[in-house]
Amino acid sequence: MITQRCHLFLTTLFTFGVLLNGGAVPPTADYELKPTNSYFIKFNPIKAPAPGPLLLKTGDRLAIIGDSITEQKIYSRIIETYLTVCVPELKITARQFGWSGETAEGFLRRMTNDCLRFNPTVATLCYGMNDHRYRPFDVKNGDWYVANYSAVVSSLQNAGARVVLGSPGCVGKVPGWTKSSAYTRDELNVNLCVLRDLDITIANNANARFADIFWTMFKAGYEGENRYATTNESYMISGKDGVHPGLAGHLVMAYCFLRALGLDGDLGTLTVDLGAQTATATAGHQVESFQHNELIVTSRKYPFCAGGEINSDNSLRSGTTLVPFFEELSRFRIVVKNAAAPQYQIIWGQTTNTYTTAQLASGVNLAADFVANPFCDAFRKMDDAVAAKQAYETKQIKQVFHSKEAKANMDKAVADTEAERSPLAAAIANAMGPVRHSIAIRPVQ
């Protein structure tokens, strides 16, 4: 039934010329707002569903599934690190299952052996890049994609997992490995956009969540090019090869998945009353003292730390300027009441920023404004631990689970690799320690 419905929708898209020529569209369709610039004229993506409430439950086991972009282990690492340090109360564990060159059909063939044996309770999916075959859209290929991606979703749900279905991303250029100059970048992106629209239908029919990676990255890439590209250096959200993003693009991808999971980004608020000389903190943070306008806090949950050059497509920080990452996913705020001076300096770690009394009264997002902050070292250690574990997961799945030895004795292969993986997973838990930090509030004279 799902495949039949998607085929009808796909045929409607094709018949009306939606996306393919920027022309007529079905009269009942609801579309995303888009910039008026000619860059977007060929694209009329249907409106994506809203993220919805929190999908995660305490103790969930998350499977992060996809092709070579997932196997890069960057957006997957951002997601796992975020869940570990920003919402530690949820106690989420994760595994990544990226496989270079894979399609939805490819994962469908290996999912029982590689993934379902670990009983995931939540899964994120990211296919479509290889499925679009680096050529213009055609209905037959669309039907093949829908059938396989729908089957992947159904299989995961039947195994008890809640699913976030991610669309493919976009391409920044026709990749060199296609060895073809027959198609343009726009033709490939139009195809990917059609697959994105089909993904919405698959997700809606399966009652799954949808992560709108294509349209979010496409808009972010255009914005990044306009802000940061120079005559000597390009800015490519999809990576220098046109397909595999750098850190900025992966930050955008992680943003899409985390929002689709329903995370609200409220990571804590510190409230200071300068008149009464008192301070309080929300859950996950404890005020140790507040004297002489200096606040000392112990935190057991971290804001997300995103460093790097703002104008580099290989920078997490740059990615946060192209989507509302801090506004929607990493709000660690300080609110200062009853301030007498017009302006105050907030000194946190080695950084000093100046704010008006009105800004402080409404709240300042420390996570967004202080790139270098007292959480950075602890955050980096955690991220390194996540990276080491995810690197082993690629070896476990791609090398060991598909080896001759595994075919002869799969139970032994699983037991041996899980014994190797176990200390890497434990290192993540051990890296999550409290951070003691101070914030000084000084009037500007």
Image (tube, rainbow, N blue to C red):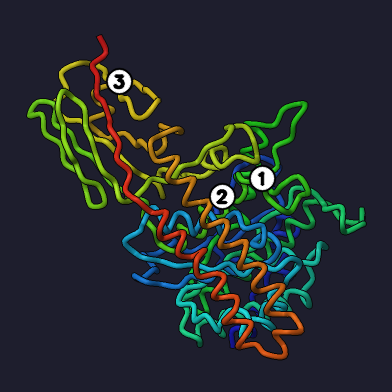
Residue 381: image location, x then y, percent: 48, 48
Report the amino acid beneath label 2: Val
- Where's residue 232, x and y in %? 77, 27
Q: CA distance from mark 3 to mark 1?
A: 35 Å
Mark 3 Cα-neighbour bin, 10 Å: few <14, some 14–19, many ≥20: some
Give the mark nearest the N terminus, 3 or 1. 1
Quadrant of the rendered structure where residue 220 is? top right
Nearest the eye: 250 or 25: 250
At 62% from the left and 70% from the top, the residue drawn is: 97
> Callout 1 environment at 10 Å: few (<14), some (14 to 19), or many (20+)?
many
Q: Give the secondary structure at mark 1.
A: loop
In the visual, does 112 lie left or right of 444?
A: right
In the rendered image, which residue does mark 3 sit on? Answer: 345
Label 2 with label 1: CB-CB less than 8 Å: yes
Figure quadrant of residue 214:
bottom right
Q: Name the amino acid, label 1.
A: Ile
Q: Amino acid at mark 3?
A: Gln
Front in this rendered view, residue 190 or 284: 284
Quadrant containing the N terminus is bottom right
Closer to the chain start, of discs 3 and 2, is 2
Q: Is residue 41 placed above or below 288 in the rendered structure?
A: below
Give the farthest residue toward the left.
Answer: 276
